[in-house]
Amino acid sequence: MRLILREEVDHLGRRGDIVNVARGYARNFLLPKRLAMEVNDDNLRIVEKEKKIYEAKLAKEKVEAEEFATTFSGVKLSFIRRVHGEAEELYGSVSVTDIAEALEAKGVTVERRRIVLPEPIKALGEFEVEVKLHPEVSVAVPVTVERDPDSAVEASEVEKGAEAAEPASEVTDG
């Protein structure tokens, strides 16, 4: 079924694009949510008007996003997490929520959905996390995940306890 997109739809197209989709997808998702409309001359004119308004709005938002991106200069996030084992795996992880809260603590308020993190950070080290402020404007925020000094002490105590327990467990038949 041929439709004109009224909004940007992930993995399908942008506003004003004419796309071919399955009838069920159109009938059950795109049309009821008013994300698309059938292709005809009247609808093409309507979408062209909407597209011009949308592009003007996008241009204005882009300028605002570029101005807001300057607030990220010098922002570096650091997280201290407990680790276990020699592989230094984190007990927890650093998630989008953690990053959003840390940014807010630094005075930069960003919606969680704007933070691009395919999966939570589950290792020590330095990472770059993308914050997508606009379809054409994004900022890379450096994130460092460090070991909690208390967890290193706990790990060494556990290892000492295991070493002390080993000799006592030896049994000799004699």
Image: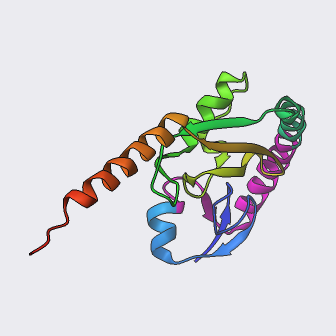
Reply above or below: 117 against 12: above
From the viewer's side, name the closer residue of 117 and 81: 81
Q: Residue furthest front?
A: 174
Question: For this view, does 145 lie left or right of residue 133?
Answer: left
Q: Is residue 52 magenta?
A: yes
The quadrant of the rendering that contains the C terminus is bottom left
Q: Position of residue 155 (x, y in %)?
A: 43, 46
Is 151 left, or right, of 76 in this rendering?
left
- Magenta stretch: helix, strand or loop mostly: helix
Foreground: 45 or 24? 24
In this view, the residue in front, 99 or 6, is: 99
Q: Is residue 143 shown in magenta?
A: no
Kindly indicate the quadrant of the structure image that contains residue 60. top right
- For the point 81% across and 55% down, which residue is it? 48
Q: Is residue 130 left or right of residue 94?
A: right
Colour theme: rainbow
Image quarter (top left, top right, bottom left or bottom right) of the N terminus: bottom right
**Where does residue 11 sit, x and y in percent of width and height?**
64, 68
Q: Residue at point 48% right, 61% down? A: 29
The relative height of residue 35 versus residue 154 in the rendered view (above or below) is below
**Residue 75 image point, x, y percent:** 79, 33
- Total numbered labels: 0
What residue lies at 54% left-to-right and 61% top-to-bottom?
30
Magenta residue span: 30-58
> Looking at the image, which residue is at 76% across and 36% down?
76
User: x and y percent of residue 20 in the render?
Assistant: 63, 78
